[in-house]
Amino acid sequence: MGKLDGKVALITGGNSGIGFAAAKLFAAEGAKVVITGRNSATLQTAAEELGANGLAVQADATDPASADKAVAAAVEAFDGLDIVFANAGIVAPTPVGGTELAIFEEVLKVNVTGPFFTVQAALPHLRAGASVILVGSVLANAGSPGRSAYSASKGAVSSMAKVLAAELSPRGIRVNTVVPGATRTPIWGQTTAEGMAQLESVLGRSIPLNRLGEPEEVAKAALFLASDDSSFIQGAEISVDGGAGGSPLGAPIYRQS
């Protein structure tokens, strides 16, 4: 018996990285899964792997109408929603003194406005005991140079999740946030194993566990928040970052031996 038997999940950005890992895990645990994404090719590939338990909907995370479209497809196919994993997000360099307004605003639209309107679109169709999961980032508090828009967007998500938890508690809907650190996903833009290994050799020095996370490790945290195992957890954040946020001075770069 799976942890999500009989549940229906909507996962934005479910065609790659953490979203796709979560889609596969949720489906393996018994859920019907609706995934969204911009790229039709990767969506199709992801849908084929999910099989009968999956449905792919091409959608733009910056467009509230796309959120309505994805929710409508989920309700038509599976008659309701139990889980919303608002995972879609982008990264772009936004150094002060060298950033165009359009780039800054695009990051905020995808990472903040997108999750809000995804939840709003889903709200009328969320069944009792539903779970909403947002995605923060260790970079919200890390002061990473050149990442003003991304860091601000993820700080906003963490704050927004607390408000949504307060608003939705009367309906018994839980809202929590998973907070990944550096994870092996396409968001880094690395196209080869060698490139990812080089990236990990640099970034790993700043992570106490001395490695990048795997998408499946973040997906397992999302599964916990999606399932009844977390039935009394509300407005919480679960960090999946190898200690980078909670114990940064334990990273290899600070070790004496």
Image: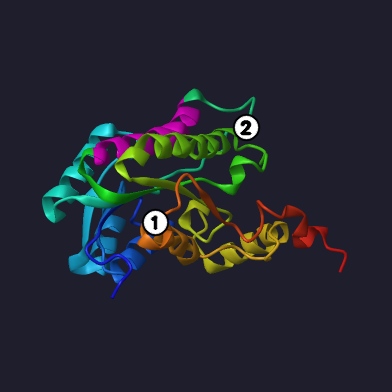
83 and 114: which is toward the camera: 83
The residue beneath circle 2 is: 95
Secondary structure state at the residue bearing disc 1? loop
Q: Is residue 16 left or right of residue 238?
A: left
Q: Quadrant of residue 166?
A: top left
Q: Residue at x 63, y 37 (%)?
A: 146
145 relative to 42, above or below = above
Q: Position of residue 228 (x, y in %)?
A: 36, 61
Kind of residue at badge 1: Ser
Please state which amino acid type lies under the numbered disc 2. Answer: Pro
Question: Bounds of the magenta span?
Answer: 102-123
Is residue 106 highlighted in magenta?
yes
| Residue at the far left in the pictured view | 76
Q: Earlier in the sequence, mark 1 or mark 2?
A: 2
Q: How is the image coloured?
A: rainbow
Name the chief secondary structure element in magenta.
helix
Q: Disc 1 designates what residue?
A: 231
Depth check: 163 or 207 in front?
Answer: 163
SS at mark 2 in the image: loop
Q: Residue at x 88, y 64 (%)?
A: 256
Using the numbered discs, state the Cα–Cα distance from disc 1 to disc 2 in whole angstroms.
41 Å
